[in-house]
Image: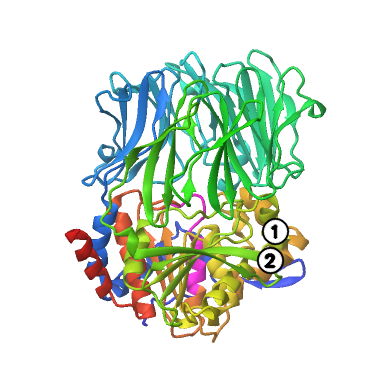
Amino acid sequence: MNQPATRADAVVDTLHGVEVADPYRWLEDEKSPEVQAWMKAQDAFTREQLERFPGREALRRRYTELFYVESLSAPAVRGNRYFYVRTHKDKEKAVVYWREGEKGEERVLLDPNTWSPDGTVSLGVWVPSWDGRKVAFSRKPNAADEAILHVLDVDTGKWSEVDVIEGAKYASPSWTPDNQSFYYAWLPTDPSIPVAERPGHTELRLHRLGTDSKADALVHPCTGDPKTFLGGNVTRDGKYLFVYVTRGWSENDVWWKRVGEKDFRLLMKGEGARYSVDVWEDAFYVQTDEGAPMERVFKVSPDRPERAAWRELVPEDPTAALQGINIVGGHLALAYLKDATTRVRLVTLEGQPVRDVALPGVGAASNLYGLEDRDEAWFVFSSFSTPPQVYKTSVSSGRVELWARVELPLQPERYTVEQAFFRSKDGTRVPLFLVHRKDLKKTGDNPTLLYGYGGFNVSMLPSFRSSIYPWLDAGGVYVVANLRGGGEYGKAWHEAGRMERKQNVFDDFHAAAEFLIREGYTRPDKLAIAGGSNGGLLVGVAMTQRPELFGAVVCQVPLLDMVRYHLFGSGKTWIPEYGTAEKPEDFRVLHAYSPYHHVKPGVRYPALLMMAADHDDRVDPLHARKFVARVQNAGHAAPALLRIEANAGHGGADQVAKAIESNVDLYSFLFEVLGVQAGGIASAANANRAR
């Protein structure tokens, strides 16, 4: 392929006695006219190539059926008002609505479809006040993380011209019970502060409605440490204020005070442990992995907050990882994962078992949504073969009823979901999910897409993904591996995949691929891998460590230069997860697997589709640019294509049309490289329409 040329510079750093070549460092400067021209040429070339691939119209028609849907979220109840999100078959973005009472007239609250002519301004967080009369919400230009906070009057629909707050990237408003103020995390927008240093400047502030945000009171100062996150919230009754200082995804400190007191006091310093606190009726309910890798719950009196006085309320379950707790209807709702599938349990506020919530099947469910003193609650359930459904339940009786469901042109009975287990390099037992048509035969020739993440305590659940169905209909196998580094089996599972143990994650992924080949699902030239963000790092490592094992790679918004990642975007906040090349011992680990530094001339790498976003302010797109340049210049025949989504952030653009085009490009690439025929898509779509 006659890909655009990229010059290489003789840039070499000596780090801890090791020479580290960085020939494409010039591509780090996105504002450079040369880099802008290079990006434009690469993206144009990629789109020209993708447009040539067959099957695109069949994919586009099918995704149009699957993505433009009517759906309803679980509601947030404030006072007598119900707030919820609805998607429409004829709108690009979801719309927030509200009703007076559960059966009241539906009214539009926030419609981001009207915010910009080109649809590039997105809705971020939205939080109603306790009486349901105000909503604090954020707007995000180009679907980036950076945001501006606004306040809306629910009754009139008017946005306040005074209550406008910049620096709302991490805002998460927490309303006071008088509905006149909220606490929020504020991040300075001063351009003189280096981007990678900004998280350390986060402050907790209090905003009073109708006042200039520049005069907002400082409630808790910044940490000054860019490796930390700072956030806080006030309890529903307004008595207690909490501040969390979080270092990575393994530990945090919790500070608290009674509102009106001058100083915060330390509830717990997290030395290798995490804590979260829910409060109701002057009791603190603390969820933690301290001394319990699968997590447990304590009850704490604010009058005796010292650690020795904590009372264990819910002991650790050694067979299931506690994911979160909510107080609803005078009970504790506990969400667990057992072999990566959800269980939801109810106990009393004294920890006595009540019942398991009756889920409609085996899959992925949310915890219960509701209020501490109201019996009604909701949860969302889905599986690989079940679109999201919202259920309403009574906490007191256990009654469960369907509240809203998504109707899609699918025949779930055509597909099957299996869970299998395999052994990684060191003998660790690792699960994965396989989804395919029921008539699939283990011929060793099936096109297979393996997805993984493996980091940051994030669990990969068997939840619904409408994008995979054209792949399944064409005879493909879709696989999700539950790698170490995630939270599927609690703290120990996460710890086994971070810092100096990160190679375990990659070994798990390689072993998953070998399992699929050994069991007769596929073979290397029919096996594709995909991942985004930390999962983009995963597939970049897989591609460079085991190029012979894969036929295609889809790498999305990735980290790939692990020697310099901490200097850009939100990189310093990830140092507790990865380490930093500034330390000799961390450098040796990072440099050993950093994908950018392990691209070698003459190696036959699998075909690569790199998918980046031009306004990604979390993971700088320089990673994608540098890696693609190095792969293209490695001198092998397979394509290395760079696709750049315009006006999009780390999570992509939030318009349905753009999601369709992104998936058309992704799957037409896989169809072409792996030799998949699109005929099955058209026949499946016709059968579903007839149905």
Q: Residues within 10 Å of mark 2 (few under 14, many from 20)?
A: few
Residue 674, given in percent of the width and then of the height, sits at 39, 79
When the figure is inspected, residue 7 is found, relative to residue 275, above or below; the finding is below
Give the residue drawn at x 65%, y 70%: 424
Q: Nearer the viewer, residue 529 or 580?
A: 529
Give the residue drawn at x 47%, y 22%: 374
Q: Indicate which disc residue 140 carries.
A: none
Give the residue drawn at x 53%, y 68%: 539
Query: Was residue 623 drawn as part of the magenta stretch in this picture?
Result: yes
Which residue, given by chain and number where applicable, does mark 1 sit on?
496
* 95 relative position to 481: left or right: left
Q: Residues within 10 Å of mark 1 (few under 14, many from 20)?
A: some
- Of callouts 2 and 1, the N-terminal one: 2
Q: Nearer the viewer, mark 2 or mark 1?
A: 2
Q: Which residues are magenta?
A: 615-629
Q: Are marks 2 and 1 in contact (CB under 8 Å)?
A: yes
Q: Identify the amino acid type marked 2.
A: Thr
Q: Identify the amino acid type marked 1.
A: Ala
Q: Quadrant of the C terminus?
A: bottom left
